[in-house]
Image: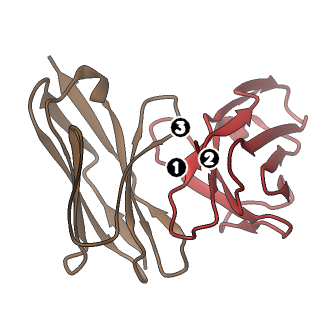
Amino acid sequence: GQNIDQPTEMTATEGAIVQINCTYQTSGFNGLFWYQQHAGEAPTFLSYNVLDGLEEKGRFSSFLSRSKGYSYLLLKELQMKDSASYLCAVTDSNYQLIWGAGTKLIIKP
Amino acid sequence: GAVVSQHPSWVICKSGTSVKIECRSLDFQATTMFWYRQFPKQSLMLMATSNEGSKATYEQGVEKDKFLINHASLTLSTLTVTSAHPEDSSFYICSARGLREVGEQFFGPGTRLTVL
């Protein structure tokens, strides 16, 4: 079966760094997405990785290792507005997007 | 670019009535649109995938006769919840994907449906 695992909830301090991990087992792989979703709102795109390595975009970076079926989203200089759910999603061989359950990130002052 | 709109943003209706939700891609052609449902504190659940001009593909457990999807053009898909019941109350979100199959999905702002 297809499976994406990420922690249910994480807590971090304002100004700190947090890493949200995602592991996946899918039938084929055509890329991995990270989305941010604030409560009561639709998801917004953060990053896309299809090759191994680190993609940096401002305070957010995303890493992919295809051989390990592993990705992480790194958030630096955390701000209170970063409190949200972070969704990991993988495009499989049929170009279907398989979603993880999301990680709720709580930022404390 | 890549803006997706959804209308209405919220709706309250009586049990037994039907509700139509529109999803539009405003500045790109969406060959594929997706409809999701999200209950409070839960992750997105894909309901169906629709390609322009063809019948939607429904996920297991989703009643196609209850959730009617029409994707009549490359910029518009509609979801009609027929004979809505209180258990259909949820956050309905559409997303659209452009011509690239591996491209990201662009999400609409969502529609909050409350059935009394």
What residue appears at the point 55 percent right and 40 percent down from the top-left corner?
B39
Question: Which three-letter amino acid code belongs to the residue tagged 3?
Answer: Ala
Q: Image quadrant for the N terminus of chain A?
A: bottom left
Label 2 with label 1: CB-CB less than 8 Å:
yes
The image shows residue A26 at horizontal and vertical percentages of 39, 77
Circle 1 sits in a helix, a strand or a loop, which is it?
Answer: loop
Q: Which chain is red?
A: B
Q: Which residue is mark 1?
A: B44
Question: Is disc 1 on the same chain as disc 2?
Answer: yes
The image shows residue A65 at horizontal and vertical percentages of 20, 72
Q: Which residue is mark 3?
A: A42
What residue appears at the point 80 percent right and 49 percent down from the top-left corner?
B76
Q: Is residue A8 left or right of residue B35?
A: left
What residue appears at the point 87 percent right and 59 percent down from the top-left corner?
B65
Q: Characterize the local packing of mark 2: few (<14), some (14-19) or many (20 or more) Cα atoms within 10 angstroms.
A: many
> How far is disc 1 from disc 3 in space, using C-alphas?
10 Å
> How far is disc 3 from disc 2 in space, using C-alphas?
11 Å
The image shows residue B106 at horizontal and vertical percentages of 56, 48
